[in-house]
Amino acid sequence: MAIHTLAVLVENSPGVLARVASLFSRRGYNIDSLAVGPTENPKVSRMTIVLNLEGHALDQVSAQLFKLVNVIGISEMKDVDSLKREILLVKVANKAATKEIAKKHNVSIADETDSTISIEAVGSSTAIEALLTELKPHGIRELVQSGLVAIERGANTLADRTLSTMGTANESESNSSTADYQN
């Protein structure tokens, strides 16, 4: 199995996330990470989906995703061609050790009480994992970690490539009256 990161542009409408998630569920595939948020266009949202699949299964999933009415564009985000980051907030009991580890990993202290310290980190999945490994022996009290987000390096954008291969955004808007059902 191999880890794959998909960037998916979708219409910003109710039910899209549920339809995308159910597509994976119906096929028995697990989503390792899912991050969804707005884009520069308020009518479009971007999903970053991390999957652990073989090549053929990835091709099948991509084809099925693209058949969903609300999906505008899909791109696999390769490591060499993209920037990938996660966000971590973690509360730790051992303040002194955590301060040293935070300094070593160049992460910020977000909050400090008499009994705990909370830090925030932004970095690659590998960097976040290394930080957590170091913090674990010092009493992690609570943590929250975002899903992976990714963006292409350079001037190219997923929206530009999608619009150049699919037509204009106005054409996809004309289908918005039928966008609330699933193929």
Image (cartoon, rainbow, N blue to C red):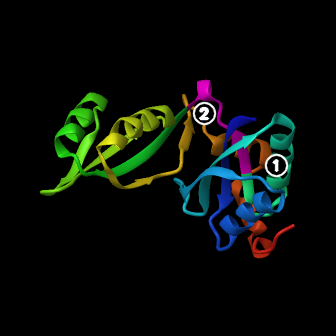
Residue to which mark 2 is pinned: 156
Q: Is residue 123 visible?
A: no
At x 76%, y 67%, the residue is: 174
Q: Nearer the viewer, residue 182 or 161?
A: 182
In this view, the residue farthest toward the top is 80
Q: Is residue 58 visible?
A: yes
At x 84%, y 43%, the residue is: 57
In the image, taking residue 73 as reference, residue 40 lies left or right, namely left
In the image, taking residue 42 as reference, residue 49 lies left or right, namely right
Asked if marks 2 and 1 touch (Cβ < 8 Å), the reply is: no
- Quadrant position of the C terminus in the picture: bottom right
Is residue 76 part of the magenta span, yes or no? yes
The amino acid pointed to by label 1 is Val
Q: Secondary structure at mark 2?
A: loop
Extent of the magenta region = 73-82
Q: Secondary structure at mark 1?
A: helix
The amino acid pointed to by label 2 is Asn
Residue to which mark 1 is pinned: 61
Q: Is residue 176 above or below residue 171?
A: below
Q: Nearer the viewer, residue 88 or 41?
A: 88
Q: x and y percent of residue 45 in the render?
A: 60, 58
At x 79%, y 48%, the residue is: 166
Q: x and y percent of residue 112 in the render?
A: 17, 53
Of badges 2 and 1, nearer the viewer stands 1
Q: Is residue 41 above or below residue 7?
A: below
- Quadrant position of the N terminus in the picture: top right
**Between disc 2 and disc 1, whose residue precedes?**
1
